[in-house]
Image (cartoon, grey):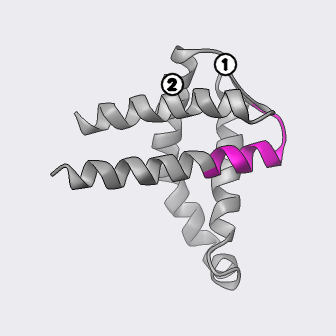
Amino acid sequence: MRLLVRWLINAATLLVIAKYIPGVLVEGWYAAFMVALVLGLINAVIRPLIVLLTLPVTILTLGLFTFVINALLFWFVSSFMGGFEVIGFMPAFWGALCMTIVSWVVSSVLKKDK
């Protein structure tokens, strides 16, 4: 049940991001659900490998390079998902930052529910 709630909130967050951040476009609820699913899978599978490979840079920047990784993955998903478009790095950065903050808040709220 928590997974479905997270999925719904992440899809709604994508729609809000598309409304307020110029350069991020989402065509509707279906696209938002699919993008939220793909982003979740990529963040679970590919992101840890990239973070491990870029560990020296991440350590040198005191962890700030992780924001760049999140932005690049957000932008990467837009390259092959229909109905989702990110135009440039800065919209990807702000969109990924918003998604990260909302996901973090939702995770902490759902953990307290136990």
| Residue identified by numbered label 1 | 83
In the rendered structure, which amino acid carries the disc numbered 2?
Answer: Met
Residue 114 % position (x, y): 15, 52
Q: Is residue 7 above or below residue 100?
A: above
Q: Does the magenta stretch include residue 96?
A: yes
In the rendered structure, which amino acid carries the disc numbered 1?
Answer: Gly
Which residue is more in the foreground, 49 or 67? 67
Look at 63% across and 52% down and name the residue there: 97
State left or right for residue 50 relative to residue 9. Answer: right
Q: Quadrant of the N terminus?
A: top left
User: Is label 1 in a helix, a strand or a loop?
Assistant: loop
The stretch of residues the image draws in magenta is 86-97
Residue 33, labelled with which disc? none
Look at 64% across and 37% down and name the residue there: 77
Residue 50, quarter of picture = bottom right
Please rate how many residues cluster around mark 2, counting C-alpha atoms within 10 Å: few if below 14, some from 14 to 19, many from 20: some
State yes or no: discs 2 and 1 in contact (Cβ < 8 Å): yes
State left or right for residue 4 relative to residue 23. Answer: left
Residue 61 % position (x, y): 70, 80
Look at 54% across and 34% down and name the residue there: 13
User: Is label 2 in a helix, a strand or a loop?
Assistant: helix
Q: Is the magenta stretch mostly helix, strand or loop?
A: helix
Residue 96 % position (x, y): 63, 48
Q: Is residue 75 above or below residue 16?
A: below
In the rendered structure, which disc, 2 or 1, sits on the residue that comes first in sequence? 2
Residue 52 % position (x, y): 55, 71
Q: Is residue 105 above or below residue 48?
A: above
Give the total of numbered labels: 2
| Residue identified by numbered label 2 | 34
